[in-house]
Image: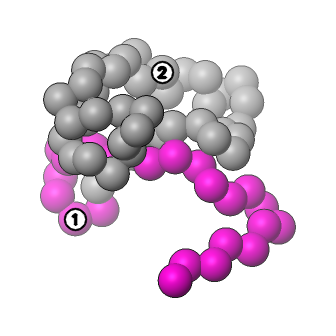
Amino acid sequence: MNPTTVESTSMMSNLHNGDKLISNKVILFFRESARGDIVVFASSVAEGDDHMNRVIGEPGDVVDLY
């Protein structure tokens, strides 16, 4: 389990800038992430920087961005 701090407003209205979370990465050994889950993952650009997003699509879904 890793402590994480929300550092943006992109997850409003559920999570607010400065909120503290504990992420559980072990759970992914027992089940896959599902729509609505919040996932924390390492940045591909800045080493040591984590990002947080909500899962909005699953395999086979079509997601439109506009």
State the image coordinates of residue 60 (x, y, percent, origin top left). Answer: 82, 67
For the stretch drawn in magenta, what is the main secondary structure? Answer: loop
Mark 2 neighbour class, 10 Å CA radius: few under 14, some 14 to 19, many 20 or more:
few
* Residue type marked 1: Val
Q: Quadrant of the N terminus?
A: top left
The residue lying toward the viewer, choosing from 5 and 24, is 5
* Residue type marked 2: Asn
The residue lying toward the viewer, choosing from 28 and 39, is 39
Kindly indicate whether the residue at mark 1 contacts the one at mark 2 (C-beta within 8 angstroms).
no
Residue labelled with disc 1 = 45
Residue labelled with disc 2 = 24
State the image coordinates of residue 47 (x, y, percent, origin top left). Answer: 17, 52
Within the magenta stretch, is there residue 19? no
Mark 1 neighbour class, 10 Å CA radius: few under 14, some 14 to 19, many 20 or more:
few
Determine the residue located farthest toward the right in the rendered image. 60
Q: Residue at x 36, y 33 (%)?
A: 15
Nearest to N terminus: mark 2 or mark 1: 2
Within the magenta stretch, is there residue 48? yes
What whole-number distance in Å separates the C-alpha atoms at marks 2 and 1?
23 Å
- In this picture, is 13 found above or below 46? above
Q: How many marks?
A: 2
Residue 42 visible in the snapshot: no
- In this picture, is 57 found above or below 52? below
Q: Which segment did they paint magenta?
A: 44-66
Residue 28 visible in the snapshot: yes
- In this picture, is 49 found above or below 66? above
State left or right for residue 11 relative to residue 18.
right
Q: Residue at x 22, y 65 (%)?
A: 45
Quarter assignment of residue 59 = bottom right
Quarter assignment of residue 7 = top left
State left or right for residue 13 relative to residue 62.
left
